[in-house]
């Protein structure tokens, strides 16, 4: 019953976050936005299962994750714009000082992205038990491994599709 | 008269077993046939040599010791064979040993090589996972589409939604990997294309 409640909560939360995230105009995140969202959603679902999160924990952790993810996506958007600017600057042969500033901006954005990850990790540490923290570490490793396996499976499928065409 | 018959009679004649009548016929034939004349000449030579052959004298003692001599020779030969057999077996073991050593060395080499190449990367954060996965996918948009469908499928599995809500096509992706029918592939192909376009 408890697990059902947690799942209902997670599902409602994911549903709402997908609506919020997809409400942004398409040109904001031209590439890989959908796939990132899907991976994020899957990670949350699997994490809930792997860590046996209580209702209270889920109520605390999920909004925080959602906020951080939104912030990270905004940083990604800015990185995308800066990369485009940098490309144009190089083509136009802008002064080196200007290019250097752009490099610095990009470096700062990347650091900001890392700090968001750290913020999330710290938040998790504060809200999880020792066993859950240990499980979270193992889950993170396993989740990445599972993603890699999925890529491999997708590659095999693609090759087979090519052969059948 | 056939030469074959004459040749047989010639042999009988040497042994002194030919009748007078046949002997006369043989003589008449030999006068006319060069081949048979030559055959008789050879036959007489062989007969003469055979008569003069010396076999040596065999004493009764020789026959008494004959069996023991034969047994002795047999055992000597057996010992020789055994010796040469051991030698051959030694070489066989040497070859087996060399083969096994080679296999062990090859195994060690492959183990080392595998340990070097299969070193796993441990990724903890979501951001790093995402970056690594995108490095793997690269610019392959079709691969990206298939991968995304798989992620959606996994989300559906995690939510434990009824099949009808998620859609049978997404659920069937795993089985697609195992055994596809052409219809399924065509359908999947079109779905992937739609996904890429969207």
Image (spheres, grey):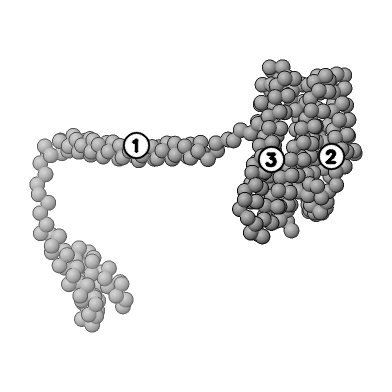
| Residue, disc 1 | B93
Task: Residue B150 in the image: state x and y as whole percent.
Answer: 76, 42
Q: Residue at x 79, y 46 (%)?
A: A29
What's the distance in space between the residues labelled 1 and 3, CA to CA? 69 Å
Q: Residue at x 85, y 18 (%)?
A: A2
Marks 1 & 2, CB-CB < 8 Å contact:
no
Task: Residue B19 in the image: state x and y as whole percent.
Answer: 23, 68
Mark 1 element type = helix
In this picture, residue A51 sits left or right of residue B38: right
Circles 1 and 3 on the same chain: no
**Disc 3 crowd, CA 10 A, few/some/many (<14, 14-19, 20+):** some
Task: Residue B99 in the image: state x and y as whole percent.
Answer: 39, 40
Task: Residue B44 in the image: state x and y as whole percent.
Answer: 16, 68
| Residue, disc 3 | A109
Q: Nearer the viewer, residue A35 or A117?
A: A117
What's the distance in space between the residues labelled 2 and 3, CA to CA? 21 Å
Circles 1 and 2 on the same chain: no
| Residue, disc 2 | A21
What's the distance in space between the residues labelled 1 and 2, CA to CA? 73 Å
In this picture, residue B164 sits left or right of residue A163: right
Query: In front: mark 2 or mark 3?
Result: 3
Q: Residue at x 66, y 21 (%)?
A: A134
| Quadrant for the N terminus of chain B in the image | bottom left
- Disc assigned to residue B133: none
Q: Residue at x 78, y 44 (%)?
A: A33
**Disc 2 crowd, CA 10 A, few/some/many (<14, 14-19, 20+):** some
Marks 2 & 3, CB-CB < 8 Å contact:
no
Q: Nearer the viewer, residue B165 or A130?
A: A130
Which quadrant of the figure has residue B38?
A: bottom left
Query: In front: mark 1 or mark 3?
Result: 3
């Amino acid at each position: 019953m408890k697990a059902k409640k947690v799942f209902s909560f997670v599902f409602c939360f994911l549903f709402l976050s997908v609506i919020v995230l997809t409400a942004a105009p398409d040109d904001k995140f031209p590439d890989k936005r959908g796939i990132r969202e899907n991976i994020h959603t899957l990670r949350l679902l699997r994490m809930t299962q792997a860590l046996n999160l209580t209702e209270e924990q889920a109520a605390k952790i999920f909004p925080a994750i959602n906020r951080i993810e939104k912030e990270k996506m905004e940083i990604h958007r800015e990185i995308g714009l800066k990369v485009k600017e940098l490309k144009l600057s190089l083509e136009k042969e802008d002064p080196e000082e200007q290019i250097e500033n752009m490099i610095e901006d990009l470096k700062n954005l990347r650091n900001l992205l890392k700090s968001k990850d750290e913020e999330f990790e710290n938040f998790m540490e504060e809200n999880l038990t020792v066993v859950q923290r240990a499980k979270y570490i193992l889950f993170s490793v396993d989740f990445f491994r599972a993603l890699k396996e999925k890529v491999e499976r997708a590659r095999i499928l693609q090759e087979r599709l090519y052969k059948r065409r | 008269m056939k030469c074959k018959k004459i040749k047989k009679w010639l042999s009988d004649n040497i042994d002194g077993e030919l009748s007078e009548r046949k002997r006369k016929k043989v003589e008449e034939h030999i006068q006319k046939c060069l081949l048979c004349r030559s055959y008789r000449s050879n036959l007489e030579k062989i007969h003469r040599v055979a008569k003069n052959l010396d076999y040596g004298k065999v004493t009764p003692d020789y026959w008494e010791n004959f069996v023991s001599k034969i047994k002795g020779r047999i055992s000597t030969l057996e010992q020789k064979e055994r010796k040469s057999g051991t030698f051959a077996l030694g070489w066989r073991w040497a070859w087996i040993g060399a083969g096994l050593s080679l296999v062990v060395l090859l195994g060690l080499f492959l183990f080392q090589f595998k340990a070097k190449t299969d070193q796993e990367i441990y990724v903890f954060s979501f951001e790093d996972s995402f970056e690594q996965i995108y490095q793997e996918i690269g610019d392959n948009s079709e691969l990206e589409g298939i991968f995304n469908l798989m992620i959606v499928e996994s989300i559906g599995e995690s939510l434990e939604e009824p099949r009808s809500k998620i859609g049978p096509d997404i659920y069937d992706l795993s089985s697609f990997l195992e055994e596809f029918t052409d219809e399924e592939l065509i359908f999947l192909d079109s779905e992937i294309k739609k996904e890429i376009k969207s």
